[in-house]
Amino acid sequence: MIGLIQNEWMKIFKRPGTYVMIAILLIVASIFSAIVKFERSGNNIEENKNWEQILMQENDALKKQLENSNSPQEKQYFQKQIATNAYRINHHIPPEMSYHLWNLVNDTTQLINLAGLFAIIIAAGIVASEFNWGTIKLLLIRPISRWKILLSKYITVLLFAIVMLAILFVYSTAIGYILFGGPDKTSIYLNYYNGTVSEQNMVIHLLINYGLNSINMIMLATMAFMISAVFRNSSLAVGLSIFLMFTGGQLTQLLSLKFSWAKYTLFANTDLMQYFEGTPMVEGMTLPFSIIMLLLYFFIFQFLAFYVFKKRDIAV
């Protein structure tokens, strides 16, 4: 199995397009960082000695807004801000006034979709290209089970996605340090979950943030891999997956306004950050529910890919 994965890995990195994708990711991250640097120039504010009083006044205003709000999303936001401000006051933790490297790393989570786009391209072509080039026969004449061949390809897709995320994280950290420097003191993140605020190491928070934000990427790459294996068409896999990447969430959001069954769709559950940083898309959704739905879709995609690949007559 390791030999098969190494073989697939070498195939990916023999293509010039792979290095182009990595270069594009680095260039976009650089441009994003430069824009942030330009916008933040001269905007660092000195710590206000009366920050506790300011936060108390802010909480008074938020409580009034909370009482007058009818939107679940607004209520969730107000409750989070009130609880976070109260925690800062009670534990004497002043708000951070300066922008530093961890802020940039947190902001670059917006570029995970770009890394996901490249993972989808690899996933869409890793099986279909074997049929297009006629090399699938060379793979299947070897005394290796078809499921092992397909599994090695899927593992390679996952490894490529992880490498792209690692490149984005490490590069953002490096350029963030160069442009903004490190925090003046140990940086903590105040995590709000289920009405409770807790302190979390900033690096741990960023790793969790990257992990949760990459779930959509992994699910779409898995779907593209399935389409590639079932239909042997990389264009269909890329086109459909990219279309759903950019529109799936919005379409699901519209459906959720009128239909409760929208919670069973894939894109209602790929954003697990909604349980930690926001409000569930459909009322009644919970974290365990979304995890179960994601596993269900994952197994459906994998079953279709492996079943069709194993049963199909490979006559090219």
Image (cartoon, rainbow, N blue to C red):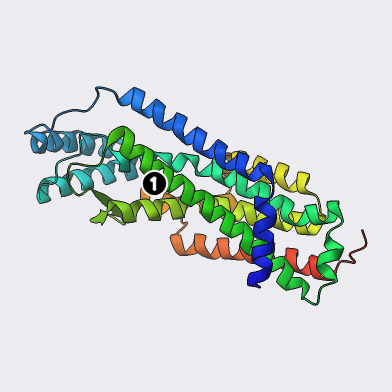
The amino acid beneath tag 1 is Gly
- State the residue at coordinates (43%, 47%): 169
Query: In the shown orientation, is residue 98 left or right of residue 174?
Result: left
Q: Is residue 91 visible?
A: yes
Could you tell me which residue is drawn at 56 percent across and 53 percent down?
A: 161
Q: In this view, does 258 lie above or below 287?
A: above
Instruction: Judge from the rendering whether residue 308 lies leftward or rightward of residue 10; answer left or right.
Output: right
Q: Quadrant of residue 63?
A: top left
Name the quadrant containing residue 78. top left
Locate residue 240 relative to residue 316 in the image: left or right.
left
How many tags in the picture?
Answer: 1
Answer few, some or many: residues within 10 Å of disc 1's Cα (few below 14, many 20 plus, some between 14 and 19): some
Q: Is the N terminus in the top left, top right, bottom left or bottom right quadrant?
A: bottom right
143 or 203: nearer the viewer: 143
Q: Residue at x 69, y 68 (%)?
A: 4
Q: Residue furthest right?
A: 315
Question: Element at badge 1?
Answer: loop
Task: Pinpoint residue 148: horizontal percent, then vertical percent.
Answer: 71, 72
Report whether residue 71 is seen. no
Q: Residue at x 45, y 33 (%)?
A: 30
Image location (x, y in percent) of residue 118: 61, 45
The residue closer to the viewer here, 302 or 261, is 302
Residue at image mark 1: 278
Using the image as rendered, state which of residue 55 and residue 232 is in the foreground: 232
Where 32 falls versus 4 (above or below)?
above
User: Where, quadrant-wise, is the C terminus in this rendering?
Assistant: bottom right
Name, please, the residue furthest toward the left: 49
* Residue 283 x %, y %: 46, 52
> Where residue 40 sits: x, y (%)?
30, 26
